[in-house]
Image: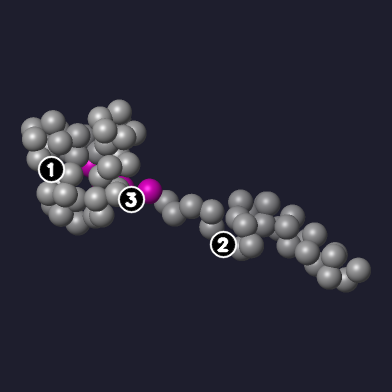
Amino acid sequence: EVIRERMKDGRERAKIKGTRSGKPLHRPKLDIDVDGIVNKYKEGMSQNQIAKSYNVSITVIRNRLSERGLT
């Protein structure tokens, strides 16, 4: 019974904090210049080159471009 009580309290606490098991659900987005990424992509720069110029992974670039409907 004590275990159930503690489990219930933990779930309620996690719900209030917006977490699952005390860990954040998502990382915050990186604050990068999305308009600059779009402009470079439209100018013909590859996603890999853009990622290197912003010092981020290519996945970040792909996600930002897909948010704008470009990939």
Amino acid marked by disc 3:
Leu
The residue pinned by badge 1 equals 46
Q: Residue at x 25, y 30 (%)?
A: 70
Q: Are marks 2 and 1 in contact (CB under 8 Å)?
A: no
Q: Are marks 3 and 1 in contact (CB under 8 Å)?
A: no
Cα distance, mark 2 to mark 1? 35 Å
Q: Amino acid at mark 2?
A: Lys
Of residues 6 and 62, the one drawn nearer to the viewer in this rendering: 62
Label at residue 23: 2
The residue furthest right is 1
- The image position of residue 58, as x and y in percent, is 24, 50
Q: Secondary structure at mark 2?
A: strand
Residue lying furthest front in this view?
71
Q: Secondary structure at mark 3?
A: loop
**Which residue is at the far top?**
69
Does 2 lie within the magenta span? no
Q: Secondary structure at mark 1?
A: loop
Q: Nearer the viewer, mark 2 or mark 1?
A: 1
Give above or below for 7 relative to 50. Answer: below
Q: Amino acid at mark 1?
A: Ser
